Amino acid sequence: MEDKTSFKSNINWFPGHMTKAMREMEKNLKLVDMVIELRDCRIPLASANPMLDKLLHQKPRLIVLTKKDKGQMEYISQWIEYLSNDITKVIAIDSLSENVADKIVQASLNVMKEKINRWIRKGMKPRAIRCMVVGIPNVGKSTLINKLAKKKITAVSDRPGVTRSLQWVKLNKDIELLDTPGVLWPKFEDLNVGYYLALVGSINDQVLPLMDVCLFALDILLKEYPERLIKRYNIDLSGDLTAIFERIGRSKNWLTANNQVDVQRTMMMFLNDIRDDKLGPITWEKINGNRESI
């Protein structure tokens, strides 16, 4: 979809609490051995905070691709291989249905294996690994922390930016977690990043024009998953995106009193269909996409 640069100057998605959280995160990095970075498996690049690399330097990292039930495993597997390197391991989880504790612990121990061996060679008794948990809003951090701790430690919501303070969570004798608020970055150079984040609900729906977000999604669906649009809405896919969007509204009877398509309702219902997987699991970003790795 065409980059609408005129919107860039109007986007404000970095409220005061995020500025404070970034400062706190940078200050507390020296307290931890490694970082567990959560990304949304549907948008593994767009859900990566580009400021994080500058803060982490060479600190070991475990990238956890969350919500794998909402993505496509063939593409998730490709992302796991693509994002892995000598100091970064990558796993995919579904916090709601999986027993993720063992998976996170084992992956963290694997990331820290070399450092633990150095401790042992120096005659030091290995202590609990201290991990900072980071991620953008609504990526599933609070759900994961609560699942790992087996009790409610942090507030869980579908609204972006619920967790707003740093807090330590002792997982077991091997792992201690420092939870952090979901943090975005002050601006983005690629407007498509904003569209991807809006699609999965990681930024408020007021940040970008919803019609642009809907047409961005519809363009991808038309090119890559046309059969899903037909199955869900039973519509003809000829014509331009606006015409197809109007057919979606009529197919579901999302109409005004005078029998016109209710644009606001159709936008919200269409986005809800995407977020609630009514169109099936979708990995929006592909390895062979136009964006480079962050």
Image (cartoon, rainbow, N blue to C red):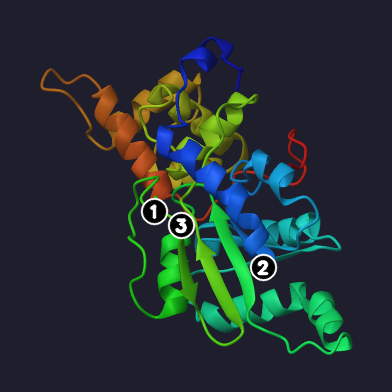
Q: Nearer the viewer, mark 3 or mark 2?
A: 3
* Amino acid at the residue labelled 1: Thr
Q: Secondary structure at mark 3?
A: loop
Residue at the (62%, 71%) spot, across then down: 130
Depth check: give the residue in front, 38 or 239. Answer: 38
Residue annotated with mark 2: 91
Labelled disc at residue 166: 3
Q: Which percent across, then down, holds residue 185?
A: 56, 35
Label 1: how many residues lie within 10 Å, few (<14), some (14-19) or many (20+)? many
Residue at the (64%, 56%) spot, across then down: 29
Labelled disc at residue 154: none
Residue 63 visible in image: no
CA gap, disc 2 and disc 1: 23 Å
Taking the image as shown, residue 215 lies to the left or right of residue 288, namely left
Label 2: how many residues lie within 10 Å, few (<14), some (14-19) or many (20+)? many
N-term-proximal mark, 2 vs 1: 2
